[in-house]
Image (cartoon, rainbow, N blue to C red):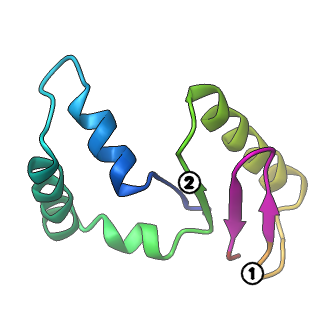
Amino acid sequence: MVVLSVHAPKTLRYQRLGQREVRPLTPREVDQRDFSEIKNIEKAGPIAVADYHIINDGDFQDLYKNIDTIMKQILEFPNLPPNFSHKGPQRQMTGDR
């Protein structure tokens, strides 16, 4: 099993969630939601132990490109050593396998 974590900087989450057409959130509501997810659905654990991390600070095209890069790595090199890291076209992605 491989765990991939996708997360964005807090200021960008504030911006994105505040601009949603359906149920936009204030920064305070974003913080409340984040803490609730950490506490109630134990979201922090999988993020902490993820094999790969993508910093989602670009657009959808950047995100999909980074996911494709990681998927190719996983399929081509399933036994990467621990602390393997890969710098994508614009974002850094790391693998702690």
- Quarter of the picture containing the C terminus is bottom right
Q: Relative to residue 24, is residue 85 drawn left or right? A: right
Residue 19 placed where, x, y %?
26, 26
Kindly state the secondary structure of the residue where label 2 is placed. strand
Q: Relative to residue 66, is residue 44 drawn left or right? A: left
Is 41 in front, or is 91? 91
Disc on res. 83 = 1
Is 43 in front, or is 89? 89
- Within 10 angstroms of label 1, few (less than 14), some, or many (20 or more) residues? few
| Residue type marked 1 | Asn
Q: In the displayed image of the protein, which residue is found farthest to the right?
A: 76
Q: Relative to residue 61, is residue 39 drawn left or right? A: left
Q: In this view, does 13 lie above or below 78?
A: above
Identify the residue at horizontal 59%, vertical 54% (top origin): 54
User: Which sits earlier in the primary sequence, circle 2 or circle 1?
Assistant: 2
Q: Nearer the viewer, mark 2 or mark 1?
A: 2
Q: In this view, does 44 lie above or below 76?
A: below
- Find the magenta span and give its range: 85-95
The answer to if 86 sits in the magenta stretch is: yes
Which residue lies under the disc numbered 2?
55
